[in-house]
Image (cartoon, helix red, strand yellow):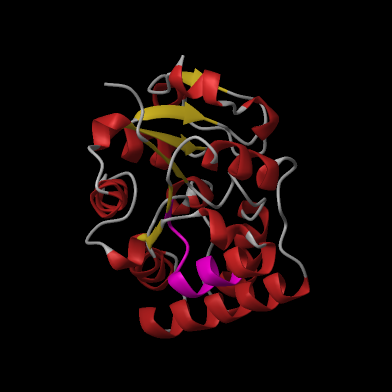
């Protein structure tokens, strides 16, 4: 059986948000007396809200409990999105194009409040049948939980779904769920080679994301 649904990641696939997340969290860690480590950004990509809030508080030395860290960082991100949502080139067109062929899901590490803000402000919300945040499942990426949950709510077998991902942890999560993985890596945040190797196809931009590529 072929592909019956397509699941998108949001950050780094539809919106160029990873640089904003990095700016906001770097600034917050510095203000709160913590220390940003060389591997911090790579580790953060894919973590759920609870996971990164604990990481900033416990491992980077931020002087605040995780629940405060999460609330204050998310408030700063929401303020940035209120100014403008950084859509990636071809994002709207790609979602429209793929939605004509398959039901779509969204599997994001962003908190629910930011997912809803982005999808509403861009008008993309009308194209997605199911959206889930990793804060709504047990484990963040690279665990497959959010992808398995989206597939279940789409009423599709995970092995019949394709996933579009950019980060190493996201690629690992989609692959662990059994999905056909399309990698759309961001050059500023390249995934590890062993994660990229899990992808069936690698594209340089969303203009390359076509039904033929997904099924081929």
Asked if one can make out residue 65 in the rendered structure from this viewpoint, the answer is no
The mark tally for this picture is 0
Position of 157 compared to 195: left or right? left
Percent position of residue 210, x then y = 59, 26
Q: How far across and down, in percent of the image, does residue 179 sit?
A: 31, 31
- Vertical side of 53 occupied by 2: above or below: above
What x and y, as percent, mark residue 94? 63, 39
From this view, report whether residue 55 is shown above or below residue 215. Answer: below
The residue at the point 61 percent across, 37 percent down is: 97
Q: Residue furthest front?
A: 100
Estimate the x, y position of residue 19 in percent, counting from the top left.
67, 54
For the residue pair 140 and 215, the one nearer the viewer reads as 215
Q: Is residue 110 magenta?
A: yes
Q: Nearer the viewer, residue 27 or 194?
A: 194
Q: Is 94 in front, or is 65?
A: 94
Name the quadrant containing residue 199. Answer: top left
Which residue is pictured at 55% across the width and 62% down the height?
125
- Choose top left, top right, bottom left or bottom right for residue 163: top left
Residue 19 visible in the shown view: yes
List the single residue furthest toward the top: 216
Residue 94 position (above or below residue 32): above
Give the quarter of the figure containing the N terminus: top left
Q: Is residue 198 left or right of residue 191?
A: left
Q: Residue at x 69, y 70 (%)?
A: 81
- Look at 48% across and 24% down and name the residue there: 214
Asked if the magenta segment contains residue 214, the reply would be: no
Look at the image and give the residue range highlighted in magenta: 107-117
């Amino acid at each position: 059986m072929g592909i019956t649904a397509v699941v998108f990641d949001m950050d780094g696939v539809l919106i160029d948000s990873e640089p904003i997340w990095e700016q906001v969290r770097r600034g917050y860690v510095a203000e709160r007396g913590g220390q940003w480590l060389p591997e911090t950004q790579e580790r953060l990509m894919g973590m759920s809200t609870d996971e990164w809030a604990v990481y900033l508080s416990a491992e980077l030395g931020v002087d605040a409990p995780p629940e405060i860290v999460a609330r204050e960082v998310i408030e700063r991100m929401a303020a940035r999105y209120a100014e403008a949502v950084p859509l990636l080139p071809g994002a709207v067109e790609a979602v429209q194009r793929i939605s004509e062929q398959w039901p779509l899901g969204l599997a994001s590490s962003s908190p629910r409040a930011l997912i809803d803000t982005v999808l509403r402000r861009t008008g993309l919300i009308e194209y997605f049948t199911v959206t889930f945040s990793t804060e709504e499942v047990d484990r963040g990426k690279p665990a497959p939980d959010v992808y398995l949950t989206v597939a279940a709510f789409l009423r599709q077998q995970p092995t019949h779904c394709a996933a579009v991902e950019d980060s190493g942890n996201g690629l690992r999560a989609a692959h662990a769920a059994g999905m056909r993985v399309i990698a759309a890596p961001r050059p500023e945040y390249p995934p590890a080679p062993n994660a990229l190797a899990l992808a069936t196809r690698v594209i340089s931009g969303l203009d390359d994301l076509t039904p033929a590529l997904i099924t081929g």
